[in-house]
Image (cartoon, rainbow, N blue to C red):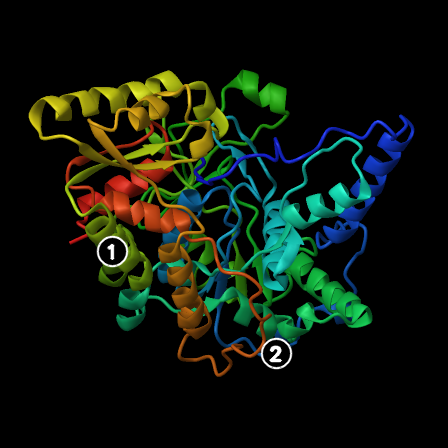
Amino acid sequence: MDSGHRHGGGVAGKWKKRPTIFTNYRAPLLLFTFTVIAIFISSKIFISPSLLPLSPDSRPPQCTHTPGEKYLWYAPHSGFSNQLSEFRNAILMAAILNRTLIVPPVLDHHAVALGSCPKFRVLDPNELRFRVWNHSIQLIRDRRLVQFSSIIAVSLYELEEHMKQNFKAVRYVSMADIVDLSSLVASSAVRFMDFRVFVSKWCDVNLSLACTADSSMHSSLLEKLRQCGSLLSGYDGNVDACLFASQEDCRTTVWTYQTDDGVLDSFQADEELKKKRKFSFSRTRKDVSRALGPGSTAGSATVLAFGSLFTGPYKGSESHIDIHEAPNDQRVQLVIQKIEFLQFVPEILNAGKSFAHEMISAPFICAQLRLLDGQFKNHWDGTFQVLKQTLDSLKQKGSLPIHVFIMTDLPRLNWTGSYLGDLEKDSDSFKLFVLREEDELVTETAKKLVNAAYGLKLQSVSSSFDGREQHCSPLSLPDILLYVEETICGCASLGFVGTAGSTIANSIELMRKNHACS
């Protein structure tokens, strides 16, 4: 169900052998010290809301005001492709319910995971929302612990170097910075507001203070944000006409529109699973407009908070959202057509096209190979076999060498001994191309995206506050390698070979189907 793609590996080979002058008792002591430091630095994760209950006067100012604009907030999760799929569903829900969609950041791969809908084992909506809120606030603050590698005793110098290598600044990237929403905005089909602007407005905070070195100000601000996030996550229950936090998820509900309201879904948990999981509920198909739209309790709330909006086909049903057309609502039908394929912003598209036309400068095939993540690490033979068959066929038909763009999470230094290593050695038959995060094309494109700041400019016309001065100054460039690679694969005129079961491969196929490179 998940997707993601990252380059890089561990820290093997970077550490000297432990000095013999270190005695055994110092190893656990140093490791303990490092762990404490890491926990301290990564304490951006907030305290569980159950430990610090909300006080009545801690509710966001908007809860005490007369409701005007109404918002939809949800909790994206997993890899980018899953997040993009959820974003499309969120746009659809916002259109149906006539709410302003809060555009989330792109969460780090697997920073938040949902669980398994087919196995009826997923995070509670409140917990999922609060985890997403915490991670989003971490990204706003720009600095956090991004990697913690277990180590044995080393010298203090080596420990310092290790921390420098494994702690780095992380740039907040809005989904609107990556995905082009201009056609939806131009048609006024859906209203949008960036998450940072919403937080500033709803929680009544200046987010630029999150970057200050003033610890007392930090503490006060973070507590206010924690209280605000806890309320919006639903831990305080539904709050009058302020908030409706939906408790529906893929275990209980399949959302529909203008059809099948109140009937049981075709896919249900069997009795053995119900007994094992200790529940008795059934999955019901519900019309989202009737349940959460005008005239309902949720419909009167200023903020409607969903949990996960991920869905996927399973055993003849959809796991959570089954809305593919709206013949009786032309406005929603137009949105469904527009979100079928959401294009990347021009900066990313231009970068991918530039690499394809100027760096490769010949007809080429793209191979997207997921080899290290999750289930894919156990299926190397099958993944390589499809690519080998395709390349063998091209060798018989065309001129040599065959140009191949490789998109993989396996570091190039680790290709030796694999089929990729064999291809690399056969330079008479194949010319391989890869793109790296540090390549000039990627870094220059990232700078353009930072300057474009599409997310912070993307507010509904009814909002008089844009918040562009209320965010932390960037300390690093956004990681956009994945999106440029997908665009390059969309330009592969000799064909595309993707990893079976990878949603990244599905995204690339969709790009190719919609001629994104033309």
Residue receiving disc 2: 65
Percent across and percent down for residue 472 are 60, 70
Quadrant of res 205? bottom right
- Which residue type carries mark 2? His
Between residue 293 and residue 131, name the one nearer to us.
131
What is the crowding at mark 1: few (fewer than 14 residues within 10 Å), some, or many (at least 20)?
Answer: some
Q: Is any atom of residue 497 visible in this view?
A: yes
Label 2, secondary structure: give it.
loop
Percent across and percent down for residue 69 are 48, 74
Percent across and percent down for residue 500 are 33, 27
Q: Is residue 54 above or below residue 341?
A: below
Q: Is residue 162 above or below residue 327?
A: above
Quadrant of res 61? bottom right
Quadrant of res 234? bottom right
The residue under the point 53% across, 18% down is 271
- Which residue type carries mark 1? Ser
**Tag of residue 354:** 1
> What is the quadrant of the C terminus in the image?
bottom left
The residue under the point 34% across, 18% down is 382
